[in-house]
Image (spheres, helix red, strand yellow):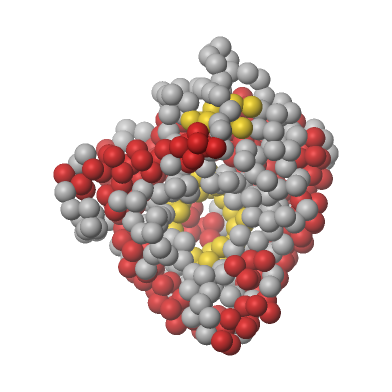
Amino acid sequence: MASAPAVPESGFGAFVARARAAGTLVVQPRMGMAAPLLMRDGLLATRNADAVTVGTITLDSYTRTGDLGAARRALAEGVGLNGYPIATHPPDTTRAVLRGITDARFPVQVRHGSAMPEHIVRALLAVGLDATEGGPVSYCLPYSRTPLREAVANWQRCCELLSSAAQFGAEPHLETFGGCLMGQLCPPSLLIAVSVLEALFFRQHGLRSLSLSYAQQADPRQDEEALTVLGRLAAELLPDVDHHVVLYAYMGVFPRSPGGARLLLEDAARLAVRAGADRLIVKTTAEAHRIPTVGENVLALETAAAAAAAERAGSPRAALSGTHAGGTGIEDTGIEAEARALIGAVLELDADVGRALVKAFAAGYLDVPYCLHPDNAGRSRTSIASDGRLRWSSVGSMPLAVRSDGGPRPPILGSAGLLSALSHVQRAYDARAAAQPAFGAAPGLLPPPVPPRATTTPRRELGLTTP
């Protein structure tokens, strides 16, 4: 049996590992502002939140697509951007944004959404950062029309660039986005399989500190089973690298009421604790309406931290969550068997994981529901069943068996059914909020403030006192 990987002494993965050892969930915003001073203020507010946090620099759409000329023109003309243009601002400008804020006690991750991110990786390394996320499948199929083969080649170069930072004493970290894919209506087994396969691709190309993602879906019981399976498979298939699981608060149509949005976020935090995730990407009460303010992001971080602390204090399984040893009493509905079938079928296609991924999509062995990318077969379909869980309506050519319980598959959705499924979570949580006087009586107000001292683990205990 392979020995457990050594926990790195510094870097993004090391910080999360220290938080896990301290019994604390790391919470993280999605935040990116074009103006350097505003970006710095956002990072500082995140660091000072009453929670154990890591920082985020989310990039703008021009940078994501490689249109750096458009990013330069936007900055010159004062046109608003929807994120931070890290490849356009001079490196000294970004270093000034980070100076005195990011260190071993507050690592910062660059988030981007690019199918071809080599220019982004070069830019983040140039300013002293070494943590980012994405993947050759998860940032290609949902977000671009780039041929998958080209995305795989570009991501291979990105992994090799990132891993080269280790020779300068860094421990670069890469997070898969494979557990998110289209954001919603994607059954857990496919999310798990792509997250694990992307992590294996990262490891094959030199990375030794990884995180595996999963996005909260429609049913907490199904999500708890899925996260438990993801942790188990990661421990089995990635025994020689530092890794952790990151949960994304629901990525689909968000509740419109502040109360509904808060309830959904709190459920995500509780789910993370129960199922052994070590980091949570939050969403805010403004999510359904506009880009959130820094203050709304901080409130979301503190709300999630408070809910996680309360769950940990009251859950008899919380002591096991940090090792992914939870799962006792969780119903096995076949998620693990499906995920293993998908992973195994892909890995049998080629010893090189990147080539195997390309072949798998060409053969329809991986098929993302409702994804219109030319390299996706587009034959799989899903629906929310009567019990609230996501089910396959059609598996196309994927190597998945019919339901083992013998029950019928949900019907393939028409346009009206698809729209209804997409808003299922929003309707459910807005209805829950309306039924609770604390949330429903004053629909124009934010939820009540978070109780003070969301975390009992001071940040100084989670990192070195020097950068």
Q: Choose between 322 and 178: the one closer to the eye.
A: 178
- Report whether residue 466 is seen: no
Q: Which residue shows up at 59% across the image and 54% down it?
A: 175
Is 195 situated left or right of 136 in this image? left
Q: Choose between 451 and 259: the one closer to the eye.
A: 259
Q: Residue furthest top?
A: 406
Q: Which residue shows up at 36% across the image and 33% down it?
A: 317
Q: Position of residue 100 (x, y in %)?
A: 45, 79
Residue 326 in which image quadrant: top left
Q: Position of residue 3 (x, y in %)?
A: 62, 41
Residue 243, relative to residue 67: is it above or below? above
Residue 129 in which image quadrant: bottom right
Q: Which residue shows up at 66% across the image and 69% down it?
A: 120
Residue 229, relative to residue 106: is it above or below? above
Q: Which residue shows up at 53% across the image and 46% down it?
A: 183
Q: Choose between 423 and 158: the one closer to the eye.
A: 423
Q: Choose between 43 and 292: the one closer to the eye.
A: 292
Residue 378 in which image quadrant: top right
Residue 377, relative to residue 461: is it above or below? above
Quarter occupied by the N terminus: top right
Q: Position of residue 73 (x, y in %)?
A: 62, 83
Q: Position of residue 179 (x, y in %)?
A: 57, 44
- Report whether residue 423 is seen: yes
